[in-house]
Each structure stands twice: as C-alpha cells, then as structure tokens.
C-alpha cells in the first residue's frame, strides 16, 4: 500500500510537470498551429536567470539567493518578458505561415536562445543549489517524499485551477478558448488576434517560469539543453490529450506522467530506459486511431 | 424516359435513386431521384440551399447519403471513395474551382488523366488535345495561380474532361462570369456530349445558361423534386415559379 | 508540341536536374583543385546533408506534409551499414546482440549501402502504411514520434548499437567525389520521381487534396510511395555519413540534425528540388563563412573577427529572417528555368482523340 502510494505521488508530480509544460505548448499550438520548441528555452532561461551571467565554471547565485517572495515573481517576470519578445520579434511577422515554416522558425528561435546562453554562460553544465530545503524528504501521510514533489503537485493544482477559472470566467479567457479551438472563426467573431496571442505567450511564459523553478530545484544542474526532453514529452502529451483542447493538454500531461511512472515500475530492468519509446509508440497509435486526441474537440471536415 | 433513351445510349446511365441526406435531423436531400445518359446535358436548378451541391457531393462520393443508391452504367458506386468514383468515369468541377494553383494549366489537366490511370505521356497528349479543343493551348504553361477568374473556370472544365469521363458534373461553371464569358462557356458546354460522348449534369443559377444548353431540366427545392422536363415546360411550370417566388433566382 | 524538336524537349525536361548537377560539379571541381583537405571535407559533409535534404524533399516537397522525423531513417541506414561492414572480430565483442549471420557478414560497401537503405525504406514503408490515412498535422507529429521512438530504442540497445557510446571502425571509403556521385544519383531519383505520374499526383494533392481525390488520386497510396522512397534516400545519406566519419553515435541523429536539414529545405524552398539543393548550398556556405570569420579574416587592412559562438546566433537570425521575408524560400518553389526562353505554345494539327472509351474506364484501385 505504501509502495503504491509512493508510486502514485511520483506519477502525479511527474504528471504535474508534463501537464504545466504541455499546457504552455498546447495553448500556443491551438491558436497558431505553432509547435513552439522555444518553450523549452523559456524554461531554460528561467533557470539560468537564477545565477550571475558569467562564463565561470562555478555558478554564482544571483536572483537565486533572494527570498522566495522576491525570487519567484522576478523569474516569472523575466520569462514572461522573454516570451512576449519572442512572439513580437519572431512569430508575429510569421502570422499565417504554414506549419513547416512556423516549426522551423521556432527551431531557429530555440537555436538562437541556446547559443546566446552558450555565449554568456558557456556550454558546460553548471551546478546550482536553489531551494535546498525543498529537496529534503518530509513525512507525508506515513510516507517520506521529497518536498519538491508536493510543491510541484501544489503548483500544478493552483495554476491549472487558476487558469481554468480565467478561461471560464473572464472575457479574455473565453476569447482564448475560442481562438484555441478555431482561430479563424474566432477572429471573424471579433476576437482580437494580437491581444489574445500576446496573452497566450504571457501565460505560456508564466507556466514555463514555474516549471523552470521546480525543475532546477529537482535536478540542480543547469545546461543549455536541459529542457529538451521535457518539451518533447510535453508536446506528445498535448497530442494525446487532443490538439487544440487546453483541458486535453493538461489531462494528457498527467496521463503521460502516470504512464511513464507505471512503465518505469512494471518494465523489467533491461527495458526501463526505453520507457519513453513506449510512450512515443502510444502516441502513434493515438494519432492513427484517434487523430483528434483522446479528449475530443470538434472534428473539422473540409467543405467541398 | 427521355428522348435520349430512345437514341440508343445502351443503358449507360448515371442514376441516383431516392437519395436522402440528413445533417443532424435536417434533411438536405429528401428522396431525390435523377437520371441522365451520355448524350445529354441535364440541368439541375433550385434556390440557394435547395441541395444541389449536396447532390453533386453524394454522386462523387464526398458526402455519404443517409439513404438511396447511386449507379454508374449499372454499377453501384454509392459507397465508393471519391478517387475510385473519379476513376470509374464520373468527373466534376467545383464551385470554388479548386485548381492545383502552383502547377501549370497543362499539368492541371494531366493530373486528371494520370489519376485515371494513364501514363504521364498519354495524359499529356490528352491534355494537349483538350486544350486545343477549348482554344486554350497558348496558356498551357501558365501557372493556374496566374489565370484570370474566367479562365480558371474554363480550365476547371477542361480538367474535368481530361479524365475521359462518362459523365461530368459542372457545379456553377458560369458563376461570376461576364456575359461574354458566359457565352463562351455555354458554347463549350454545348459541345461536350457530341465531342466526348460524355453526359453533363449542369448546376447553375444563371437561367440564360441553363435554358440555353440543357435538353432537360430538373428543379429541386428543400431537397425535394419539384419538376422535370424540357426548358420550355419548366419555364411555364407553376410549381417552379412558386418555388422561386420566395427566393428569386440570382443572375450572376 | 510541334514547335519544339524532340531533343530540345528532352533537354528542357531534364534541365532542372542537369543545371543543379552542373552547379554541384563546378563546386566539387573547384574545391578539388584548391587542394584544401579541409574544404573537401566541408563539401563532402555538405553533400551528405544534401542527400538527406533531397530525401526529405521527396516526401515533404511533393506532398506538402511536414516530415518532422526523417533523420531516424538516416540513423537506421548508418547503423545497418555498420552491422554489415565492421570486422566480424570487432562485432563479436562490441555488438554481441547482433544475429550470427550479421556478426559474420562483411559485405561489399555498395551492397551494404543498398541493403541498409532498403532497411530504412522498409521501416518508413511500415510506418507510412499505418499513419498516412490520418490528417497532415497528425502525420507530421507521428513521423516525429516515430523518430523519437527509434532514437530512444537505439540509445538503449547496447548490445546492437553500443547505446550512448560510439561505434568505431567503419571502413572510410567515402570522400568528396564518392558523395558527389551519390548526390547525383539521389537528385536524379528525386527528379524522375517528381516528374513521374506518381510525383504529379502527389503534387496535386499538395495543392488541393479534395480536388486530387475527385480526379482519381489515391492520396494515401501516393503518400506511402513517397515516404518510402524518401526513407530509402535518407538511408543512403546515413550510410555515407557513417563511412565518411568512420564513427557513429546515436546522439548525432536527433533534434540538431533535424533542425539543420529542415532549415536547409525550408530556406531553399521546400516545393522544388532546386530549393532543396540551393538551401543546402547557402546554409553550408554561410556556416563556413562565419566559421572562417571566427578565425579572423582580413578585409582591407582591418582584421575582422567574430567572438566564438556568434556564428550560430547570426545563422539562426538569418534563417528566421528568410522565413519572415521570403516564406516560400529562396527559390520560391521553382526549378531553375531553361535559359533559352519559356516553352513555346502548343500548336494544333493532331487528330482528335477526345472520345472516351465507352465503359472502358479503369475501375481498379
């Protein structure tokens, strides 16, 4: 019983990270058909912002030394600004471009970000200790779990809940949901494209910042490609949940988190490392048999 | 049935029997039947939203019929996918024209032949023949994207003929054309049955075109049949006039 | 087309291929004459990328469907040729997971290349059969998921791929000229495919899927054919890559290479073979120029030197700029035009062959 609970907490906390990241990617994808690979760099930048910009081998904490009360808003603001700038400089001029161009553009943005990081910080991984107290295990319903796992779960619940309220209750939220499901129709109905898209990028920046703080607390290592795997899995999650459905993206993230943890537990040792291959295989099956995702939005049929 | 049947068309008919299409309870087509042979130009008219395009989509496999059968020269093609129906000899134009924009006029026509199973060489030969037939060979190498609107419509018809069809369905070929262009298109359409041995199902709002080229006309309203007959009878048919009273025909 | 002689017609027909071949030939001859080993290696590496990009183009350019996971076929080709050409003694110890016949095999490089590319094609074929029925966006993502799956498996399949370690000792028979010959072969394959009825049918579906289906194009089958051929060609690129470097790492076949190759294609213009080739040339040249500038270059009397790492940033910004200001790519989807005027209008004089064969229409699927 304890074992199962332990696994469940692992699964949900992993799912929380996937879910928050998936939502950031799904939000942009739903509106712009843009697979935003640079989302991973938003996460990376949030983590690098904790230390003094320098090429030194040993990282000197900068914002990282601030109390959480200042640290968290600072990182969130930085990442949101980066996300908005990215939208304004790189993606706004590409409005209406085809999916390949958008994908390449996001690759290019990601490439530029990564090499700017290399220019400033060098490509060497760096250790950084933030929130050491959170890495310790605490007693929780008779279990010893790392506090950061509970923080991740708490952050996910708060952010997802807040976002759900925002999307349901506010005018901008409703516009954003409409835009995510059918951008063209939403525009015809008077949704202001620039506002909604900027807002979407701001929210994805917020989500990325939170993920980056949790992520760096968990791993303690900075590297310019630290978020690549996270982003790939998160993107896959949006597909499983249903592209264009924000609820689907969030749910997909949890589903993949649970699936990965379950596979990790069930698979024989030789295959544990290939657990992601099973997740990717599962995605292909979903795309073949339910291309609209497991959580269905509306099926679009082209009029002849 | 019609006079064409007595001309000995060997029973090569395009036939739709009792076609119904329901969208979430709404009947777009309700038990409609039409039939034409390979020697005639058959007009289909009706007010906007009466189900004309839905019928074309059912015939060409783009829309599943809720009930009813479609047969082509005796074969039941009701549940075939579009590409198979296209190969079996039923070709069409689109209201939105839908040319292959980034390809040349010649290639647009070739694709119809290639899709029909011809080699590229044979398809090119046939495409050239058709362009000559429509006096359009001088624009063979122009990109479809660069054509003026009237020419787009003509190329659409040429493409439909390039697949060597037994029947061709023309979905509003004269929409948006000037009077002079309309005359050109009418002449073109009128020559199809004799030159290609191909029946024509013509959907059109422009009454001048319909009355000018069709041997028989079928009128539908709200997915149901109102009348069928030669142009003279249709023009004086009280049911037809009533059907058009609420929504008068749009002369483009 | 009486106005054109048959010879001129054939020349015109193959000009888009011939002109590109000529450009590559000039580059290769000049670099060969320069005697710079470094330049030759750069060009050879560029030509290997060219083969991969042309392979991606075969599917993506003709179908209009983004192929996001093509690099996996390069990996499959590269590892397959390693299995077939490494010394049996080496394999016995380093790759014990291989089946016996593969451990003992030491094939001729050409045979190995063909077999390896066929394996890549076979994998592409099986995937294509499964995914090509769904919508274009789902197809793109499925190709990516398949790549991620292949990458994860190879990265952990120690007994056959050495996992995250490198396989060394592939016979290094590949130099600039060898790659050049294969690049010509591959470009010819791509060009002949694109002017064949299969290529034409797929291009029609790229322009308008609905209309293509109405005119008898089985879009599913056409996509499967193109994707399989694409896998074959990309596989060749992988084989040459392996024998050029003599060393293989799974890590090399991942996002970075996916990005570079796709960027080359899109920057050049994904809708034409010329776009694929020009994109590779431009990006390879730009990369090389920036690399030289990092070393420092004398322009006039001043030494201009870029700080280390700036070249990638500039390159990324440049690609972004091309995406923004020339979204159809440098070539704009066109092939290199015949230099002696546009095709002459078709003249009449042919006997009419318009009648349709009554009831003889093909109905097979």
Image (cartoon, rainbow, N blue to C red):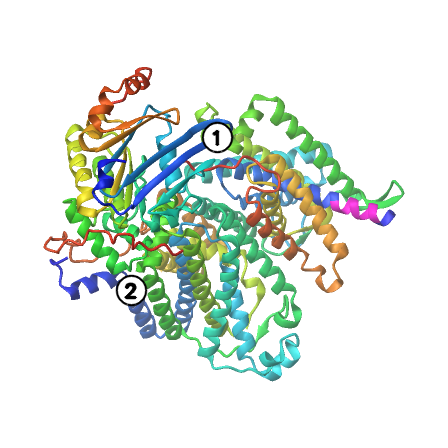
Magenta stretch in the rendered image: A4-11
Residue C127: image location, x then y, percent: 52, 58
> Image quadrant of residue B8?
top left
Please tell me whether residue C97 is drawn above or below residue C333 in the rendered image: below
Q: Can see residue C322?
A: no
Circles 2 and 1, Cβ within 8 Å, touching? The answer is: no
Q: Can see residue C265?
A: yes
Quadrant containing the C terminus of chain A in the rendered view: top left
Considering depth in this image, is A88 or A237 the residue closer to the camera?
A237
Front of the two marks 2 and 1: 1
Considering depth in this image, is C307 or C246 the residue closer to the camera?
C246
> Image quadrant of residue B52?
top left
Q: Residue furthest left?
A: C349
Residue A212: image location, x then y, percent: 66, 43
- Residue at 70% over, 41% down: A16
Considering depth in this image, is C328 or B230 the residue closer to the camera?
B230
Q: Does residue A134 appear left or right of residue A76 in this picture?
A: right
Residue A165: image location, x then y, percent: 65, 26
Please tell me whether residue A259 is drawn above or below residue C36 in the rendered image: above
Q: How many residues crowd mark 1 within 10 Å: few (<14), some (14–19), many (20+)?
A: few
- In the rendered structure, does residue C295 fall within the stretch colored magenta? no
Disc 2 is placed on an element classified as helix
> Image quadrant of residue B202?
top left
Q: Label 2 marks which chain's residue?
A: C
Residue C209: image location, x then y, percent: 39, 45
Mark 1, residue position: B23
- Looking at the rendered structure, the number of numbered marks drawn on it comes to 2
Instruction: Name the mark on residue C77.
Output: none
Label 2, label 1: how many angstroms apart (C-alpha)? 58 Å
Q: Label 1 marks which chain's residue?
A: B
Mark 2, residue position: C23
């Amino acid at each position: 019983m304890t074992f199962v609970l332990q696994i469940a907490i692992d699964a949900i906390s992993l799912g929380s990270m996937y879910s928050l990241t998936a939502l950031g990617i799904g939000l942009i994808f739903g509106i712009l058909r843009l697979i935003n690979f640079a989302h991973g760099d938003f996460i990376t930048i949030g983590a690098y912002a904790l230390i003094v910009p320098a090429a030194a081998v040993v990282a000197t904490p900068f914002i990282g030394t601030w109390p959480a009360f200042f640290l968290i808003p600072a990182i969130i603001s930085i990442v949101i600004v980066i996300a908005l700038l990215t939208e304004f400089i790189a993606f706004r001029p590409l409005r209406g471009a085809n999916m390949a161009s958008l994908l390449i553009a996001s690759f290019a943005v990601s490439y530029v970000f990564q090499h700017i990081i290399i220019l400033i910080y060098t490509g060497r991984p760096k250790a950084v200790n933030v929130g050491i107290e959170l890495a310790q295990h605490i007693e929780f319903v008779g279990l010893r779990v790392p506090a950061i796992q509970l923080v991740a779960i708490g952050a996910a619940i708060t952010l997802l809940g807040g976002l759900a309220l925002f999307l349901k209750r506010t005018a901008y939220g409703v516009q954003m949901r409409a835009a995510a499901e059918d951008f063209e129709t939403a525009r015809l109905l008077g949704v202001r494209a620039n506002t909604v898209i900027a807002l979407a990028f701001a929210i994805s920046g917020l989500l990325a910042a939170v993920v980056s703080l949790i992520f760096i607390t968990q791993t303690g290592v900075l590297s310019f490609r630290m978020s690549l795997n996270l982003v790939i899995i998160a993107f896959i999650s949006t597909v499983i949940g249903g592209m264009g459905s924000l609820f689907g993206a969030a749910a997909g993230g949890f589903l993949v988190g649970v699936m990965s943890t379950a596979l990790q537990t069930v698979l024989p040792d030789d295959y544990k490392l290939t657990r992601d291959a099973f997740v990717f295989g599962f995605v292909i099956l979903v795309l073949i048999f339910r291309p609209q995702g497991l959580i269905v939005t509306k099926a679009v049929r082209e009029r002849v | 049935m019609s006079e064409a049947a007595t001309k000995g068309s060997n029973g090569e008919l395009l036939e739709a029997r009792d076609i119904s299409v329901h969208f979430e309870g709404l009947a777009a087509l309700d038990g409609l039947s039409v039939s034409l042979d390979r020697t005639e130009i058959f007009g289909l008219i009706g007010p906007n939203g009466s189900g004309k395009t839905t019928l074309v989509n059912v015939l060409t496999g783009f829309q599943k019929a809720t009930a009813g059968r479609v047969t082509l020269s005796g074969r039941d093609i009701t549940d075939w996918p579009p590409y198979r129906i296209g190969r079996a000899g039923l070709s069409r134009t689109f209201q939105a024209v839908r040319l292959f924009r980034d390809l040349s006029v010649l290639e647009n026509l070739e694709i119809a032949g290639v899709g029909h199973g011809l080699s590229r060489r044979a398809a090119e030969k046939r495409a050239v023949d058709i362009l000559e037939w429509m006096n359009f060979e001088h624009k063979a190498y122009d990109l479809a994207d660069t054509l003026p609107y009237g020419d787009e419509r003509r190329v659409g018809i040429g493409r439909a003929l390039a697949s060597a069809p037994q029947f061709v369905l023309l979905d509003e070929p004269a929409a948006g054309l000037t009077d002079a262009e309309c005359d050109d298109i009418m002449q073109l359409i009128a020559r199809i049955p004799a030159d290609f041995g191909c029946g024509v199902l013509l959907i059109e709002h422009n009454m001048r075109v319909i009355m000018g080229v069709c041997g028989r006309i079928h009128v539908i309203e709200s997915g149901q049949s109102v009348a069928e007959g030669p142009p003279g009878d249709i023009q004086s048919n009280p049911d037809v006039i009533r059907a058009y009273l609420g929504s008068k025909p749009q002369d483009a | 087309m009486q106005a054109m002689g048959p010879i001129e017609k054939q020349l015109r027909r193959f000009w888009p291929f011939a002109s590109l071949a000529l450009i590559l030939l000039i580059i290769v001859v000049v670099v060969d004459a320069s005697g710079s080993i470094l330049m030759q290696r750069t060009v050879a590496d560029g030509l290997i990328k060219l083969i991969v990009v042309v392979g991606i183009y075969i599917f993506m350019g003709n179908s209009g469907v983004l192929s996001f996971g093509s690099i996996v076929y390069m990996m499959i080709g590269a590892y397959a040729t390693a299995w077939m050409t490494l010394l049996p003694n080496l394999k016995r110890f380093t790759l014990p997971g291989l089946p016996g016949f593969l451990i003992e095999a030491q094939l001729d490089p050409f045979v190995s290349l063909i077999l390896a590319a066929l394996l890549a094609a076979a994998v592409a074929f099986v995937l294509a059969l499964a995914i090509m029925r769904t919508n274009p966006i789902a197809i793109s993502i499925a190709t990516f998921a398949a790549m991620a799956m292949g990458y994860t498996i190879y990265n952990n399949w120690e007994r056959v791929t050495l996992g995250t370690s490198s396989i060394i000792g592939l016979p290094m028979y590949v130099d600039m000229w060898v790659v050049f010959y294969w690049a010509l072969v591959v470009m010819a394959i791509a060009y002949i495919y694109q002017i064949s009825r299969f290529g034409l049918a797929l291009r029609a579906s790229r322009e308008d899927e609905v209309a293509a289906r109405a005119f008898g194009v089985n879009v599913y089958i056409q996509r499967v054919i193109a994707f399989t051929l694409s896998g074959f060609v990309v596989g060749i690129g992988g084989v040459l890559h392996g024998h050029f470097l003599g060393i293989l790492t799974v890590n090399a076949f991942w996002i970075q290479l996916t990005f570079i190759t796709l960027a080359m294609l899109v920057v050049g213009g994904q809708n034409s073979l010329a776009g694929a080739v020009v994109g590779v040339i431009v990006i390879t040249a730009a990369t090389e120029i920036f690399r030289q500038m990092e070393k420092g270059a004398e322009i006039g009397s001043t030494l201009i030197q870029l700080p280390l790492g700036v070249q990638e940033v500039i390159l990324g910004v440049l690609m972004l700029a091309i995406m923004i200001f020339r979204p159809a790519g440098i070539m704009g989807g066109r092939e290199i035009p015949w230099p002696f005027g546009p095709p002459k209008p078709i003249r009449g004089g042919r006997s009419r062959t318009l009648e349709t064969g009554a009831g003889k229409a093909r109905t097979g699927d």
